[in-house]
Image (spheres, rainbow, N blue to C red):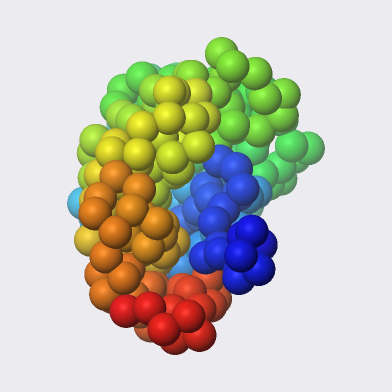
Amino acid sequence: MRRDGRRSAPVVPHLAAIITAISAGSPSWPDAAAADKTPYSASESCAPVACQGASPVQVSKSTVEEVTRLAESAERGDPETQARLGLLYYEGTGVPQSYETARRWWRRAATQGHARAQFCLGVLYDRGLGMDRQPAVAMEWFRQAAQQDYPPAQFNLAVMLSEEPRTPDRATEAVSWLTKAAGSGMAKAQANLGWCYAEGLGVSPDVTKAERWFRLAAEQGHALAQVNLGNCYREGRGVRRDAEEALRWFRKAAAQGLADGQYSVGLCYLEGRG
């Protein structure tokens, strides 16, 4: 509530609340360009899902023949087919679903330095799939993949570093990994990095950099970044105050069904702005 009695446009209170999820609902390979389908969750992060960039697993003419071919190559030690076979077991595509078997194949690939397998192992340990949740082990696998410049792992590592215990050193490291992921073009990382600069989380506050990162994410269609960019225009933070431009970005977020965007549009009309 503002001092004049009118409600301000909504904002997100802290980094963990704006961390967003790549939904685990579609069977194929994880990559940095995967789309958000379960937005604005503080507890979820990147997972093995449909993506652009890496080829999805295709079970071709004969499922049995395809799995057999992959298994033979995996047994010979090829890390790529080990990782793909792990994904089949993770999803239950052409084989009985088994997190334990997925973990076994991903571990074999991960120990050979396969970044995506390291990332996928991190997901299993982070979510406690087929085992008790082990955040420290998850973080180590994410870190190994992140160090190979794998953006989803960089993002997940930042998510974990933003959780308890929150310390200045962890916040600084989280921003470092977010910056790497954001630089790859990952919209959710750009949106979160913008919030870090807006609120001074792990970095010195900088409204100009906040606006820049919000814009990059918003232009990719990230709904919460669109709301935050609209707030920049509404309040004149990092840009010239422009009610019409604020309303334009709020409408984009509202059109995606984001409640904060819909609320912000309604607030503009209520106040006669834009």
Q: Is residue 120 left or right of residue 190?
A: right
* Residue 152 on image: x %, y %: 39, 40
* Residue 200 on image: x %, y %: 49, 30
Q: Is residue 36 left or right of residue 127?
A: left
* Residue 86 on image: x %, y %: 47, 45
Q: Quadrant of residue 51?
A: bottom left
Q: Quadrant of residue 178?
A: top left
Toward the right, the furthest residue is 132
**Could you say which is closer to the camera, residue 247 or residue 57?**
247
Residue at horizontal 36%, vertical 32%? 206
**Could you say which is closer to the camera, residue 261 or residue 34?**
261
Residue 241 shows in this picture: yes
Q: Quadrant of the C terminus?
A: bottom left
**Could you say which is closer to the camera, residue 232 or residue 16?**
232
Q: In this picture, is 201 found above or below 84?
A: above
Q: In this picture, is 92 found above or below 208?
A: below
Residue at horizontal 48%, vertical 74%? 264
Q: Is residue 90 left or right of residue 85?
A: right
